Amino acid sequence: MQTSLETLGELERRLTMSVPVAEIETEIQQRLARLAKNVKVPGFRPGKVPIKMVAQQYGPQVRSDVISDAVKSNFADAIREKNLRIAGNPRIEPKPEAAAPDLLEFSAVFEIYPEVKVGDLSDVTIERAQADVGAEDIERTIEMLRRQRTRYEHVVRGAAEGDRVTVDFKGKTDGLEFPGGQATDFAIVLGEGRMLPEFETAITGIAKARRRRSRSPSRRTITARKWRGRWPSSSSR
């Protein structure tokens, strides 16, 4: 394989490579021969298909695959040989007019990583960051961990703040359902503020298999239907 490297810019390079056409043709014939052993053609038994018929049907695709593999393989070898660290994928450019008729020539345009030189660090002073952790920080972290590990248990009372309830609901505007205003088996923790205040207020105090209706300032009516057979849950931390 013959290669030449050009510098197009500060980081851009062009690597020109050539592969003997004989190598390409040899590989094409070997792949067609392997393909002929397994290909199925009406009127022929497996492995008995004439190589010319296989070449007519599969030759263009096999040639394209062989050339693509040759380009990738030779480019990788050239990069290792020249010890280049490329950034991104190369742009492959075929050369229609080769220097010799028995050579397949192509070029790859790519960028390389810049060389970074570390200066003298003997006089550099490094300050280690200090973090003061107070009692409030510890309590806040403990509370966060408690919330992350909350365990809920079934209760037989009305829903209260801090309880997780599972509810079906439908939202309507002027008596008509609006997109995104319906849910089934929707879990809500009362008091977290994830839902409209009017909606949470309507749910508070409700027990299993009950139904309530709430109205928001935007005149949207939300009906909280049955609890799907589930009890409101109290948190245990």
Image (cartoon, grey):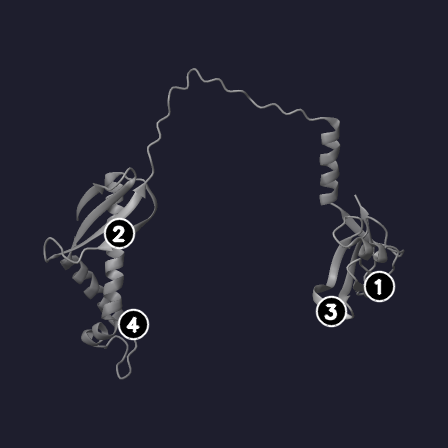
Instruction: Give residue 177's mark.
Output: 3
Q: CA distance from mark 3 to mark 1?
A: 14 Å
Q: First in sequence: mark 3 or mark 4?
A: 4
Disc 2 and disc 3 in contact, CB within 8 angstroms: no
* Comparing labels 4 and 2, the label whose residue is closer to the camera: 2
Residue to which mark 1 is pinned: 213
Q: Residues within 10 Å of mark 1 (few under 14, many from 20)?
A: some
Q: CA distance from mark 1 to mark 2?
A: 70 Å
Q: Position of residue 44 (x, y in %)?
A: 26, 81
Q: What is the three-letter code of the residue carrying label 2?
A: Ser
Mark 2 — residue? 73
Which comes sooner in the sequence, label 2 or label 3? Answer: 2
Name the residue located 24 percent from the left edge and 69 percent from the top edge.
Answer: 60
Question: x, y (%) of residue 207?
Answer: 87, 60
User: Residue 203, image x and y in percent?
Assistant: 84, 57
The residue carrying pointer 3 sits among few (fewer than 14), some (14 to 19) or many (20 or more) residues within 10 Å by Cα, namely: some
| Residue occupied by mark 4 | 38
Give the residue type that dot 1 points to: Arg
